[in-house]
Amino acid sequence: MRETVDTITRYALVFLMGLLVVDVVWQVFTRYILASPSTFTDELARFLLIWVSLLGGAYASGKHLHLSIDLISHRLSPSGQQKLAIIIYVIIILFVTTVLIIGEAYWFTISIFTVNSPLPFKYRWPIST
């Protein structure tokens, strides 16, 4: 099951990244060659970048491919490496929790205002339930 999810995520990332590249190239072409930039491509690039970041981060984290500096870990014993890994995961959990709390406060603050996306579908930021 894990391999299936990883494969689907990998193909989705390749597709979204390819679409992002085509979108940005088209935006640059319309802006500098045609002198008439498209607002749709700018907004689409923004949404694609968000999804590529979220899916890519989840995929890399699941594969233990996240960025790390391993200057210390190679010099430690196996038990020391385990302890260091636990410390690193605790720091990651604290960081993510802090970002979620700040993000919730930001979401609450921005929920007072309504910003409409220029995309053709009816997307309202923030999504009100």
Image (cartoon, rainbow, N blue to C red):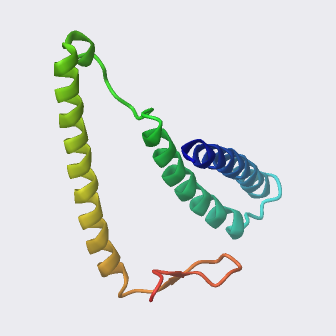
Where is residue 14 drawn, in percent x and y?
68, 44
Residue in the picture at 22% in, 21% down: 81
In the picture provided, is 15 more to the left or to the right than 13? right
How many callouts does the rendering have?
Answer: 0
Task: Please identify the quadrant where the C terminus is shown.
Answer: bottom left
- The quarter holding residue 43 reads bottom right
Is 125 placed above or below 112 here?
above
Is 38 placed above or below 51 here?
below
Is 6 placed above or below 74 here?
below
**Which residue extends farthest front?**
1
Where is residue 64 drawn, in percent x and y?
42, 34
In the picture provided, is 31 more to the left or to the right than 126? right
Is 82 placed above or below 20 here?
above
**Which residue extends farthest top?**
75
Residue in the picture at 77% in, 64% down: 36
Judging depth in this view, the residue of 23 and 91 nearest the camera is 91
Judging depth in this view, the residue of 24 and 19 nearest the camera is 19
Where is residue 103 drawn, in percent x and y?
31, 67
- The quarter holding residue 72 reads top left
Judging depth in this view, the residue of 53 and 117 nearest the camera is 53
In the picture provided, is 45 more to the left or to the right than 110? right
Where is residue 52 drawn, in percent x and y?
57, 51
Residue in the picture at 27% in, 13% down: 74
In the picture provided, is 34 more to the left or to the right than 85? right
**Which residue extends farthest right?**
34
Residue in the picture at 59% in, 78% down: 117
